[in-house]
Protein backbone atom coordinates (compact mmCIF):
# COMPACT_ATOMS: atom_id res chain seq x y z
CA UNK A 1 0.00 0.00 0.00
CA UNK A 2 1.30 3.47 -0.90
CA UNK A 3 1.51 5.92 1.95
CA UNK A 4 1.57 9.69 2.34
CA UNK A 5 1.53 11.93 5.38
CA UNK A 6 -1.64 13.62 4.13
CA UNK A 7 -4.12 12.70 1.42
CA UNK A 8 -6.31 15.53 0.12
CA UNK A 9 -9.43 14.38 -1.76
CA UNK A 10 -10.49 17.06 -4.24
CA UNK A 11 -8.25 19.38 -6.23
CA UNK A 12 -10.36 22.53 -6.24
CA UNK A 13 -9.05 25.77 -4.72
CA UNK A 14 -9.53 24.55 -1.14
CA UNK A 15 -7.73 21.25 -1.66
CA UNK A 16 -4.98 22.90 -3.71
CA UNK A 17 -4.37 25.47 -0.99
CA UNK A 18 -4.11 22.86 1.77
CA UNK A 19 -1.96 20.47 -0.29
CA UNK A 20 0.45 23.17 -1.48
CA UNK A 21 0.89 24.56 2.02
CA UNK A 22 1.58 21.14 3.48
CA UNK A 23 3.88 20.15 0.62
CA UNK A 24 5.86 23.38 0.85
CA UNK A 25 6.46 22.69 4.53
CA UNK A 26 7.98 19.30 3.89
CA UNK A 27 5.12 16.85 4.33
CA UNK A 28 4.57 14.03 1.86
CA UNK A 29 1.22 14.92 0.32
CA UNK A 30 -1.05 13.43 -2.36
CA UNK A 31 -4.00 15.20 -3.94
CA UNK A 32 -6.74 13.07 -5.50
CA UNK A 33 -8.74 14.64 -8.33
CA UNK A 34 -11.04 12.99 -10.82
CA UNK A 35 -11.43 15.96 -13.16
CA UNK A 36 -9.19 19.02 -13.30
CA UNK A 37 -6.93 20.62 -10.73
CA UNK A 38 -8.54 23.99 -10.10
CA UNK A 39 -11.97 22.47 -9.48
CA UNK A 40 -15.34 23.98 -10.16
CA UNK A 41 -14.06 27.48 -9.42
CA UNK A 42 -11.43 27.60 -12.15
CA UNK A 43 -13.40 26.13 -15.06
CA UNK A 44 -17.14 26.29 -14.36
CA UNK A 45 -17.81 28.85 -11.62
CA UNK A 46 -15.91 31.91 -10.34
CA UNK A 47 -13.42 32.41 -13.16
CA UNK A 48 -15.61 31.93 -16.25
CA UNK A 49 -18.54 33.78 -14.68
CA UNK A 50 -16.38 36.81 -13.97
CA UNK A 51 -14.98 36.60 -17.51
CA UNK A 52 -18.58 36.76 -18.75
CA UNK A 53 -19.45 39.79 -16.59
CA UNK A 54 -16.38 42.00 -16.66
CA UNK A 55 -16.53 43.19 -20.31
CA UNK A 56 -20.04 44.60 -19.89
CA UNK A 57 -19.00 46.27 -16.64
CA UNK A 58 -16.04 47.94 -18.36
CA UNK A 59 -18.26 49.03 -21.25
CA UNK A 60 -20.90 50.43 -18.89
CA UNK A 61 -18.23 52.39 -17.02
CA UNK A 62 -16.79 53.79 -20.26
CA UNK A 63 -20.29 54.90 -21.28
CA UNK A 64 -20.61 56.90 -18.06
CA UNK A 65 -17.52 59.01 -18.74
CA UNK A 66 -17.52 61.95 -21.14
CA UNK A 67 -14.65 61.46 -23.56
CA UNK A 68 -14.66 57.69 -23.18
CA UNK A 69 -18.37 57.49 -23.95
CA UNK A 70 -17.87 58.99 -27.40
CA UNK A 71 -15.19 56.41 -28.17
CA UNK A 72 -17.63 53.54 -27.54
CA UNK A 73 -19.08 53.03 -30.97
CA UNK A 74 -20.41 49.49 -30.75
CA UNK A 75 -21.98 46.90 -28.54
CA UNK A 76 -20.47 43.95 -26.68
CA UNK A 77 -18.65 41.61 -29.05
CA UNK A 78 -20.03 38.37 -27.63
CA UNK A 79 -17.96 35.91 -29.71
CA UNK A 80 -14.77 37.78 -28.70
CA UNK A 81 -15.93 37.80 -25.09
CA UNK A 82 -16.51 34.04 -25.19
CA UNK A 83 -13.04 33.53 -26.65
CA UNK A 84 -11.68 35.63 -23.79
CA UNK A 85 -13.58 33.43 -21.34
CA UNK A 86 -11.98 30.35 -22.90
CA UNK A 87 -8.55 31.89 -22.34
CA UNK A 88 -9.42 32.57 -18.70
CA UNK A 89 -10.34 28.92 -18.16
CA UNK A 90 -7.20 27.81 -20.02
CA UNK A 91 -9.27 25.77 -22.49
CA UNK A 92 -9.77 23.21 -19.69
CA UNK A 93 -6.05 22.58 -19.44
CA UNK A 94 -4.87 22.20 -15.84
CA UNK A 95 -1.14 21.92 -16.54
CA UNK A 96 -0.38 25.22 -14.79
CA UNK A 97 -1.95 24.40 -11.41
CA UNK A 98 -0.53 20.89 -11.72
CA UNK A 99 2.99 22.27 -12.13
CA UNK A 100 2.39 24.55 -9.18
CA UNK A 101 1.49 21.59 -6.99
CA UNK A 102 4.45 19.59 -8.32
CA UNK A 103 6.71 22.51 -7.41
CA UNK A 104 5.44 22.11 -3.83
CA UNK A 105 6.21 18.39 -3.90
CA UNK A 106 2.57 17.30 -4.06
CA UNK A 107 1.79 14.01 -5.87
CA UNK A 108 -1.30 14.02 -8.10
CA UNK A 109 -3.45 10.89 -8.08
CA UNK A 110 -5.99 11.08 -10.90
CA UNK A 111 -9.20 9.28 -10.13
CA UNK A 112 -12.08 9.13 -7.73
CA UNK A 113 -11.11 9.06 -4.08
CA UNK A 114 -13.16 7.16 -1.48
CA UNK A 115 -12.72 6.83 2.24
CA UNK A 116 -12.51 3.20 3.30
CA UNK A 117 -11.96 3.52 7.04
CA UNK A 118 -9.52 5.20 9.40
CA UNK A 119 -6.74 6.97 7.45
CA UNK A 120 -7.46 4.86 4.40
CA UNK A 121 -8.48 6.05 0.94
CA UNK A 122 -8.89 4.22 -2.33
CA UNK A 123 -8.30 5.74 -5.75
CA UNK A 124 -9.71 3.29 -8.25
CA UNK A 125 -8.25 -0.06 -7.20
CA UNK A 126 -5.31 1.43 -5.37
CA UNK A 127 -5.30 1.56 -1.58
CA UNK A 128 -3.61 4.57 -0.02
CA UNK A 129 -2.62 5.14 3.58
CA UNK A 130 -2.69 8.63 5.09
CA UNK A 131 -0.26 8.54 8.00
CA UNK A 132 -1.37 11.81 9.56
CA UNK A 133 -4.59 13.08 8.02
CA UNK A 134 -7.16 12.93 5.26
CA UNK A 135 -8.55 16.26 4.05
CA UNK A 136 -11.90 16.11 2.22
CA UNK A 137 -12.22 18.95 -0.28
CA UNK A 138 -14.71 17.62 -2.80
CA UNK A 139 -16.69 20.85 -3.24
CA UNK A 140 -20.43 20.81 -3.94
CA UNK A 141 -22.86 19.90 -6.70
CA UNK A 142 -25.85 21.74 -8.16
CA UNK A 143 -29.09 21.10 -6.29
CA UNK A 144 -32.16 19.99 -8.25
CA UNK A 145 -35.08 20.26 -5.79
CA UNK A 146 -38.18 18.13 -6.37
CA UNK A 147 -40.10 20.32 -8.84
CA UNK A 148 -42.68 18.48 -10.94
CA UNK A 149 -41.32 17.86 -14.43
CA UNK A 150 -37.79 19.13 -13.70
CA UNK A 151 -36.17 15.70 -14.09
CA UNK A 152 -37.77 15.31 -17.50
CA UNK A 153 -36.51 18.64 -18.90
CA UNK A 154 -33.98 17.77 -21.54
CA UNK A 155 -30.75 19.69 -21.46
CA UNK A 156 -31.48 21.79 -18.38
CA UNK A 157 -28.44 23.92 -17.63
CA UNK A 158 -26.47 24.04 -14.40
CA UNK A 159 -23.74 26.59 -13.71
CA UNK A 160 -21.42 24.43 -15.80
CA UNK A 161 -23.42 24.84 -18.99
CA UNK A 162 -24.09 28.53 -18.37
CA UNK A 163 -20.51 29.56 -17.66
CA UNK A 164 -19.08 27.59 -20.57
CA UNK A 165 -21.87 28.22 -23.11
CA UNK A 166 -20.84 28.82 -26.71
CA UNK A 167 -24.36 29.63 -27.92
CA UNK A 168 -26.54 32.38 -26.48
CA UNK A 169 -30.14 31.19 -26.13
CA UNK A 170 -32.85 33.47 -27.38
CA UNK A 171 -34.92 32.96 -24.24
CA UNK A 172 -33.37 31.85 -20.96
CA UNK A 173 -35.38 31.08 -17.83
CA UNK A 174 -33.34 31.06 -14.62
CA UNK A 175 -34.64 29.40 -11.46
CA UNK A 176 -33.07 31.02 -8.40
CA UNK A 177 -32.31 34.65 -7.60
CA UNK A 178 -29.20 34.05 -5.49
CA UNK A 179 -25.72 35.19 -6.52
CA UNK A 180 -25.38 32.68 -9.38
CA UNK A 181 -28.87 33.45 -10.73
CA UNK A 182 -28.47 37.23 -10.72
CA UNK A 183 -24.95 37.14 -12.17
CA UNK A 184 -25.99 34.85 -15.00
CA UNK A 185 -29.17 36.90 -15.58
CA UNK A 186 -27.09 40.01 -16.15
CA UNK A 187 -24.54 38.20 -18.30
CA UNK A 188 -27.02 36.55 -20.68
CA UNK A 189 -29.37 39.54 -20.88
CA UNK A 190 -26.45 41.77 -21.89
CA UNK A 191 -25.44 39.14 -24.48
CA UNK A 192 -28.84 39.42 -26.12
CA UNK A 193 -30.93 36.69 -24.47
CA UNK A 194 -34.34 37.52 -23.10
CA UNK A 195 -33.94 36.39 -19.48
CA UNK A 196 -36.74 35.55 -17.04
CA UNK A 197 -35.48 35.25 -13.47
CA UNK A 198 -37.68 33.38 -10.98
CA UNK A 199 -37.10 33.66 -7.24
CA UNK A 200 -39.48 32.14 -4.69
CA UNK A 201 -38.62 34.58 -1.91
CA UNK A 202 -40.10 38.06 -1.72
CA UNK A 203 -36.95 39.54 -3.29
CA UNK A 204 -33.74 38.63 -5.06
CA UNK A 205 -30.62 38.01 -2.96
CA UNK A 206 -32.61 37.58 0.24
CA UNK A 207 -29.50 37.21 2.39
CA UNK A 208 -28.16 40.67 1.57
CA UNK A 209 -29.31 44.13 2.68
CA UNK A 210 -32.66 45.11 1.20
CA UNK A 211 -31.31 48.36 -0.30
CA UNK A 212 -28.56 46.42 -2.08
CA UNK A 213 -31.05 43.96 -3.50
CA UNK A 214 -33.27 46.84 -4.64
CA UNK A 215 -30.40 48.47 -6.55
CA UNK A 216 -29.45 45.25 -8.31
CA UNK A 217 -33.11 44.53 -9.08
CA UNK A 218 -33.52 47.97 -10.65
CA UNK A 219 -30.34 47.48 -12.66
CA UNK A 220 -31.39 44.05 -13.92
CA UNK A 221 -34.81 45.41 -14.89
CA UNK A 222 -33.01 48.22 -16.70
CA UNK A 223 -31.09 45.62 -18.72
CA UNK A 224 -34.45 44.07 -19.60
CA UNK A 225 -34.52 41.04 -17.29
CA UNK A 226 -38.06 39.90 -16.50
CA UNK A 227 -37.94 39.37 -12.73
CA UNK A 228 -40.61 37.31 -10.97
CA UNK A 229 -40.38 37.09 -7.19
CA UNK A 230 -42.61 35.80 -4.40
CA UNK A 231 -43.74 32.59 -6.12
CA UNK A 232 -41.76 29.37 -6.51
CA UNK A 233 -41.47 27.27 -9.63
CA UNK A 234 -44.07 24.54 -9.16
CA UNK A 235 -43.93 22.55 -12.37
CA UNK A 236 -42.15 22.40 -15.70
CA UNK A 237 -43.16 21.11 -19.09
CA UNK A 238 -41.36 20.95 -22.40
CA UNK A 239 -42.97 20.83 -25.81
CA UNK A 240 -40.62 20.84 -28.75
CA UNK A 241 -38.01 23.47 -28.08
CA UNK A 242 -40.12 25.43 -25.63
CA UNK A 243 -39.96 24.90 -21.93
CA UNK A 244 -42.67 26.34 -19.67
CA UNK A 245 -42.32 27.02 -15.95
CA UNK A 246 -45.49 27.42 -13.90
CA UNK A 247 -45.10 29.19 -10.59
CA UNK A 248 -47.16 28.72 -7.40
CA UNK A 249 -49.21 31.84 -8.21
CA UNK A 250 -50.30 30.29 -11.54
CA UNK A 251 -48.04 32.53 -13.63
CA UNK A 252 -46.01 31.01 -16.48
CA UNK A 253 -42.67 31.76 -18.09
CA UNK A 254 -41.38 30.33 -21.36
CA UNK A 255 -37.85 29.78 -22.54
CA UNK A 256 -35.65 27.83 -24.90
CA UNK A 257 -33.21 26.98 -22.14
CA UNK A 258 -33.65 26.50 -18.39
CA UNK A 259 -30.83 27.31 -15.95
CA UNK A 260 -31.24 25.75 -12.51
CA UNK A 261 -29.48 27.91 -9.91
CA UNK A 262 -31.27 26.75 -6.77
CA UNK A 263 -28.34 26.12 -4.50
CA UNK A 264 -25.80 23.39 -3.94
CA UNK A 265 -25.75 19.94 -2.37
CA UNK A 266 -22.99 17.95 -0.73
CA UNK A 267 -20.98 15.57 -2.96
CA UNK A 268 -20.88 12.92 -0.24
CA UNK A 269 -23.19 10.25 -1.73
CA UNK A 270 -20.30 8.21 -3.04
CA UNK A 271 -17.34 9.27 -0.93
CA UNK A 272 -17.30 6.38 1.54
CA UNK A 273 -18.12 8.66 4.47
CA UNK A 274 -20.25 5.92 6.01
CA UNK A 275 -16.99 4.03 6.65
CA UNK A 276 -16.19 6.60 9.34
CA UNK A 277 -19.71 6.94 10.71
CA UNK A 278 -20.91 9.95 8.68
CA UNK A 279 -24.11 10.14 6.65
CA UNK A 280 -23.81 10.06 2.86
CA UNK A 281 -25.51 13.02 1.22
CA UNK A 282 -24.91 15.39 4.14
CA UNK A 283 -22.49 18.28 4.29
CA UNK A 284 -19.63 17.38 6.64
CA UNK A 285 -19.73 19.22 9.92
CA UNK A 286 -16.39 20.51 11.20
CA UNK A 287 -15.00 22.27 14.26
CA UNK A 288 -12.99 25.50 14.35
CA UNK A 289 -9.87 23.63 13.18
CA UNK A 290 -11.80 22.14 10.23
CA UNK A 291 -11.70 18.69 11.88
CA UNK A 292 -14.64 16.34 11.82
CA UNK A 293 -15.76 16.04 15.47
CA UNK A 294 -14.78 12.69 16.97
CA UNK A 295 -12.46 11.87 14.04
CA UNK A 296 -9.27 13.83 14.76
CA UNK A 297 -7.43 12.68 11.61
CA UNK A 298 -10.23 13.80 9.24
CA UNK A 299 -10.67 17.36 7.98
CA UNK A 300 -13.27 18.84 5.60
CA UNK A 301 -12.66 22.18 3.89
CA UNK A 302 -14.42 24.34 1.32
CA UNK A 303 -17.94 23.83 0.01
CA UNK A 304 -18.13 20.28 1.33
CA UNK A 305 -18.48 21.44 4.95
CA UNK A 306 -21.46 23.63 4.05
CA UNK A 307 -20.27 26.65 6.04
CA UNK A 308 -19.98 29.08 3.18
CA UNK A 309 -19.64 28.43 -0.50
CA UNK A 310 -16.95 30.78 -1.62
CA UNK A 311 -13.48 30.14 -2.91
CA UNK A 312 -11.64 32.57 -0.66
CA UNK A 313 -13.21 31.00 2.44
CA UNK A 314 -12.44 27.48 1.23
CA UNK A 315 -8.82 28.53 0.76
CA UNK A 316 -8.80 30.11 4.23
CA UNK A 317 -10.10 26.84 5.65
CA UNK A 318 -7.41 25.00 3.65
CA UNK A 319 -4.74 27.12 5.34
CA UNK A 320 -6.29 26.49 8.75
CA UNK A 321 -6.49 22.73 8.22
CA UNK A 322 -2.92 22.59 6.91
CA UNK A 323 -1.60 24.63 9.82
CA UNK A 324 -3.45 22.48 12.31
CA UNK A 325 -2.00 19.33 10.74
CA UNK A 326 1.42 21.01 11.02
CA UNK A 327 0.81 21.45 14.73
CA UNK A 328 0.27 25.19 14.84
CA UNK A 329 -1.88 26.04 17.86
CA UNK A 330 -3.26 29.26 16.39
CA UNK A 331 -4.93 27.49 13.45
CA UNK A 332 -8.44 28.20 14.67
CA UNK A 333 -11.24 29.76 12.66
CA UNK A 334 -12.04 33.31 13.66
CA UNK A 335 -15.66 32.26 13.59
CA UNK A 336 -16.56 34.45 10.65
CA UNK A 337 -16.22 31.83 7.94
CA UNK A 338 -19.96 31.17 7.83
CA UNK A 339 -22.62 33.54 6.60
CA UNK A 340 -20.69 36.56 7.91
CA UNK A 341 -17.75 35.92 5.60
CA UNK A 342 -16.72 38.53 3.01
CA UNK A 343 -18.82 38.16 -0.12
CA UNK A 344 -19.12 39.82 -3.51
CA UNK A 345 -21.87 39.70 -6.13
CA UNK A 346 -20.33 40.75 -9.41
CA UNK A 347 -23.32 42.42 -11.04
CA UNK A 348 -23.28 46.08 -12.09
CA UNK A 349 -23.75 47.52 -9.49
CA UNK A 350 -21.79 45.05 -7.44
CA UNK A 351 -22.73 44.16 -3.88
CA UNK A 352 -19.91 43.60 -1.42
CA UNK A 353 -20.52 42.72 2.20
CA UNK A 354 -18.77 41.45 5.28
CA UNK A 355 -20.10 40.62 8.73
CA UNK A 356 -23.68 41.30 9.69
CA UNK A 357 -26.49 42.73 7.65
CA UNK A 358 -29.11 44.73 9.52
CA UNK A 359 -31.33 41.62 9.67
CA UNK A 360 -28.68 39.20 10.94
CA UNK A 361 -27.40 41.72 13.51
CA UNK A 362 -30.95 42.13 14.84
CA UNK A 363 -31.47 38.37 14.96
CA UNK A 364 -28.18 38.02 16.84
CA UNK A 365 -29.46 40.50 19.43
CA UNK A 366 -26.71 43.05 18.71
CA UNK A 367 -27.11 46.65 19.87
CA UNK A 368 -25.89 48.70 16.96
CA UNK A 369 -26.21 51.90 14.98
CA UNK A 370 -26.62 52.08 11.21
CA UNK A 371 -24.78 54.68 9.14
CA UNK A 372 -25.59 55.02 5.45
CA UNK A 373 -23.75 57.12 2.94
CA UNK A 374 -23.99 57.48 -0.84
CA UNK A 375 -20.87 56.94 -2.93
CA UNK A 376 -21.98 59.99 -4.88
CA UNK A 377 -21.22 62.12 -1.80
CA UNK A 378 -17.49 61.69 -2.46
CA UNK A 379 -15.81 64.01 -4.94
CA UNK A 380 -14.25 60.95 -6.61
CA UNK A 381 -17.72 60.06 -7.87
CA UNK A 382 -17.15 62.72 -10.52
CA UNK A 383 -14.65 60.35 -12.18
CA UNK A 384 -15.68 56.91 -10.98
CA UNK A 385 -19.10 55.69 -12.07
CA UNK A 386 -20.70 59.15 -12.21
CA UNK A 387 -24.46 58.90 -11.96
CA UNK A 388 -24.40 55.20 -11.10
CA UNK A 389 -26.03 53.92 -7.91
CA UNK A 390 -23.83 53.22 -4.91
CA UNK A 391 -24.42 53.13 -1.17
CA UNK A 392 -22.37 52.14 1.85
CA UNK A 393 -23.95 50.90 5.05
CA UNK A 394 -21.87 50.52 8.18
CA UNK A 395 -23.18 48.75 11.29
CA UNK A 396 -21.43 49.88 14.46
CA UNK A 397 -21.65 48.07 17.78
CA UNK A 398 -23.09 50.68 20.12
CA UNK A 399 -21.00 49.85 23.15
CA UNK A 400 -17.69 48.79 21.67
CA UNK A 401 -17.81 51.30 18.80
CA UNK A 402 -16.46 48.72 16.36
CA UNK A 403 -17.74 47.75 12.94
CA UNK A 404 -19.80 44.55 12.97
CA UNK A 405 -20.98 44.67 9.39
CA UNK A 406 -20.62 46.55 6.16
CA UNK A 407 -22.41 46.41 2.82
CA UNK A 408 -21.41 48.54 -0.13
CA UNK A 409 -22.99 48.71 -3.56
CA UNK A 410 -21.56 50.37 -6.63
CA UNK A 411 -19.75 49.80 -9.85
CA UNK A 412 -16.29 48.19 -9.67
CA UNK A 413 -16.09 48.18 -5.88
CA UNK A 414 -15.10 44.57 -5.16
CA UNK A 415 -11.67 45.69 -4.01
CA UNK A 416 -13.24 48.07 -1.47
CA UNK A 417 -14.36 45.17 0.64
CA UNK A 418 -11.05 44.23 2.14
CA UNK A 419 -10.77 47.49 4.11
CA UNK A 420 -14.09 46.68 5.75
CA UNK A 421 -13.03 43.06 6.40
CA UNK A 422 -9.92 44.31 8.18
CA UNK A 423 -12.00 46.67 10.32
CA UNK A 424 -14.54 43.95 11.19
CA UNK A 425 -12.10 41.11 11.84
CA UNK A 426 -9.63 43.43 13.57
CA UNK A 427 -12.48 44.83 15.72
CA UNK A 428 -10.96 48.25 15.21
CA UNK A 429 -12.63 50.96 17.29
CA UNK A 430 -13.84 53.97 15.27
CA UNK A 431 -11.46 56.09 17.36
CA UNK A 432 -8.59 54.11 15.83
CA UNK A 433 -10.09 54.04 12.35
CA UNK A 434 -9.99 57.85 12.20
CA UNK A 435 -6.23 57.54 11.72
CA UNK A 436 -6.65 55.34 8.62
CA UNK A 437 -6.98 58.21 6.18
CA UNK A 438 -8.54 57.47 2.78
CA UNK A 439 -6.71 59.09 -0.13
CA UNK A 440 -8.26 61.93 -2.12
CA UNK A 441 -10.00 61.75 -4.52
CA UNK A 442 -11.20 58.19 -4.05
CA UNK A 443 -14.54 56.71 -3.18
CA UNK A 444 -12.91 55.34 -0.02
CA UNK A 445 -13.83 58.70 1.49
CA UNK A 446 -17.11 57.00 2.40
CA UNK A 447 -15.16 56.01 5.53
CA UNK A 448 -14.88 59.71 6.44
CA UNK A 449 -18.63 60.05 6.09
CA UNK A 450 -19.07 57.14 8.49
CA UNK A 451 -16.77 58.74 11.07
CA UNK A 452 -18.49 62.09 10.67
CA UNK A 453 -21.94 60.59 11.16
CA UNK A 454 -20.76 58.56 14.14
CA UNK A 455 -19.43 61.73 15.76
CA UNK A 456 -15.73 60.77 15.63
C1 LIG B 1 -21.48 30.11 -11.17
C2 LIG B 1 -20.69 30.22 -9.90
C3 LIG B 1 -19.94 31.34 -9.68
C4 LIG B 1 -19.20 31.46 -8.51
N1 LIG B 1 -18.46 32.59 -8.33
C5 LIG B 1 -17.73 32.72 -7.22
C6 LIG B 1 -16.93 33.86 -7.02
O1 LIG B 1 -16.90 34.79 -7.83
N2 LIG B 1 -16.19 33.95 -5.90
C7 LIG B 1 -16.18 32.95 -4.96
O2 LIG B 1 -15.48 33.08 -3.96
N3 LIG B 1 -16.93 31.84 -5.12
C8 LIG B 1 -17.69 31.70 -6.22
N4 LIG B 1 -18.43 30.57 -6.41
C9 LIG B 1 -18.32 29.47 -5.42
C10 LIG B 1 -17.03 28.65 -5.65
O3 LIG B 1 -17.02 28.15 -6.96
C11 LIG B 1 -16.90 27.51 -4.66
O4 LIG B 1 -17.09 28.00 -3.36
C12 LIG B 1 -15.52 26.87 -4.79
O5 LIG B 1 -15.34 26.32 -6.05
C13 LIG B 1 -15.35 25.80 -3.73
O6 LIG B 1 -14.08 25.29 -3.82
P1 LIG B 1 -13.80 23.79 -3.34
O7 LIG B 1 -12.32 23.59 -3.47
O8 LIG B 1 -14.40 23.56 -2.02
O9 LIG B 1 -14.59 22.88 -4.36
P2 LIG B 1 -14.60 22.75 -5.95
O10 LIG B 1 -14.11 23.95 -6.61
O11 LIG B 1 -15.96 22.26 -6.27
O12 LIG B 1 -13.56 21.60 -6.23
C14 LIG B 1 -13.77 20.30 -5.75
C15 LIG B 1 -12.99 19.32 -6.61
O13 LIG B 1 -13.02 18.05 -6.00
C16 LIG B 1 -13.17 17.05 -6.99
N5 LIG B 1 -13.75 15.87 -6.36
C17 LIG B 1 -14.93 15.80 -5.70
N6 LIG B 1 -15.09 14.58 -5.18
C18 LIG B 1 -13.99 13.88 -5.53
C19 LIG B 1 -13.57 12.54 -5.29
N7 LIG B 1 -14.30 11.71 -4.56
N8 LIG B 1 -12.39 12.14 -5.81
C20 LIG B 1 -11.62 12.98 -6.54
N9 LIG B 1 -11.97 14.26 -6.79
C21 LIG B 1 -13.13 14.69 -6.28
C22 LIG B 1 -14.09 17.69 -8.01
O14 LIG B 1 -13.93 17.08 -9.27
C23 LIG B 1 -13.59 19.14 -8.00
O15 LIG B 1 -12.58 19.34 -8.96
C24 LIG B 1 -19.21 30.42 -7.55
C25 LIG B 1 -19.97 29.28 -7.76
C26 LIG B 1 -20.72 29.18 -8.92
C27 LIG B 1 -21.53 27.92 -9.13
Image (cartoon, rainbow, N blue to C red):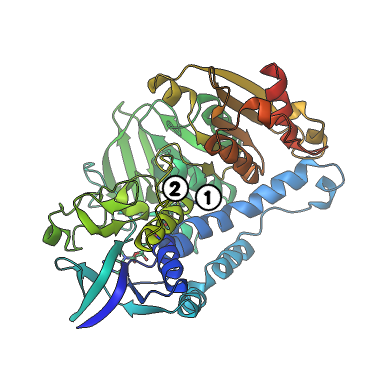
Q: Is residue 351 visible?
A: no
Contact (Cβ within 8 Å) of mark 2 with mark 1: yes
The outermost residue toward the bottom is 1
Residue that label 2 marks? 172
Q: Is residue 60 visible?
A: yes
- Choose the circle earlier in sequence order: 2 or 1: 2
Residue displayed at 26% across by 57% down: 267
Which mark is on residue 232?
Answer: none
Reply above or below: 432 against 328: above
Residue that label 1 marks? 188
In which quadrant of the rendered image does the N terminus lie? bottom left
In which quadrant of the rendered image does the C terminus lie? top right
Horizontal side of residue 372 vs 162, given as left or right: right
- Write down which quadrant ligand 1 falls in: bottom left
Give the structural element (helix, strand or loop) at label 2.
strand
For mark 2, does the 10 Å Cα neighbourhood hold few (<14), some (14 to 19), or many (20 or more) residues? many
Horizontal side of residue 87 vs 278, given as left or right: right
Alpha carbon separation for disc pair 2 and 1: 8 Å
Q: Nearer the viewer, residue 93 or 198?
A: 93
Q: Nearer the viewer, residue 94 or 28?
A: 28
Q: How many marks?
A: 2
Amino acid sequence: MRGFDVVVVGGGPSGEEAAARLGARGLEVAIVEDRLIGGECAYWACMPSKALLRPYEALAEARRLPGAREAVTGELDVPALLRGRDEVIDHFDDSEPRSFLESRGVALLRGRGRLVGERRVTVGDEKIEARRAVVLAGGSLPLFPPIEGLDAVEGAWTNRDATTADEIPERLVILGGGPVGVEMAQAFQTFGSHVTLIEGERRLLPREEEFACAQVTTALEGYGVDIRTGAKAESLSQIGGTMTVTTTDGDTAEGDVLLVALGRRAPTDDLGVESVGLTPGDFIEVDAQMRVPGTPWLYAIGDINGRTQQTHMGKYQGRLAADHILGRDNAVSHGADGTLAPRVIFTDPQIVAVGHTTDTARSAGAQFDVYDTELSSTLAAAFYSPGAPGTARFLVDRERRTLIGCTITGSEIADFLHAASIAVVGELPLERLRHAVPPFPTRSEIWLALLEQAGV
